[in-house]
Image (tube, rainbow, N blue to C red):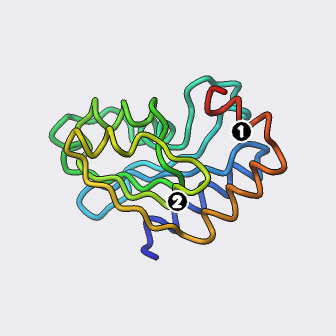
Amino acid sequence: MNEYMKEAIAEAQKGLEEGGLPIGAVLVYEGKIIGKGHNKRIQNGSVILHGEMDALENAGRKTSAIYKKCELYTTLSPCIMCTGAVLLYGIPKVIIGENKNFMGEEELLKNRGVKIEVLQDKQCIEMMKDFIEQNPSLWNEDIGV
């Protein structure tokens, strides 16, 4: 596993330790992490702070030229909201820790020309599986069920 996914997993663990969902993400530009974050919906009472959205927010305002050279690493397959942000800003590649516990909008990303790589990382799978089993109502709230 590369250093960027390790950082995304560390972010996911922070979310879990804070009482939130264990989903983390990092935004990488030219080999350097420019934003990282984790799901903060519970912690901040937010409707939009999924891990990917938090990483984008923490990267700060960037030009489209920068986004178009970025990669997004996320521990879980991105939902429709996070997929929309990837498409809006033209991020060309998303590396996903796992999609066994939740299959996001990978087909939409692929259909719009985004390169997808799914790692099926055991740590990502187990962390999310355990959380969903222990917190089904929080999980359902997070994905809009």
C-alpha distance separating marks 2 and 1: 16 Å
Residue drawn at x 38%, y 51% as measured from the top left: 27
Q: Is residue 29 left or right of residue 105?
A: left
Q: Nearer the viewer, residue 24 or 77?
A: 77
Q: Which residue is mark 1?
A: 139
**Circle 2 sits on which residue?**
98
Mark 2 near mark 1, Cβ–Cβ under 8 Å? no
The crowd level at tag 2 (other Cα within 10 Å; few <14, some 14-19, many 20+) is: many
User: For the residue marked with disc 2, what is the amino acid?
Assistant: Glu
The answer to which image quadrant residue 66 occupies is top left
Left or right, residue 141 beside residue 5: right
For the residue pair 122 and 89, the one nearer the viewer reads as 122
Label 1 element class: helix
Question: Residue 101: horizontal and vertical position, in percent?
Answer: 61, 53
Q: Is residue 141 left or right of residue 47?
A: right
Structural crowding at the residue carrying mark 1, measured as other residues with C-alpha within 10 Å and reported as few (<14), some (14–19) or many (≥20): some
Q: Position of residue 31 (x, y in %)?
A: 28, 64
The label shown at residue 17 is none
Q: Secondary structure at mark 2?
A: loop
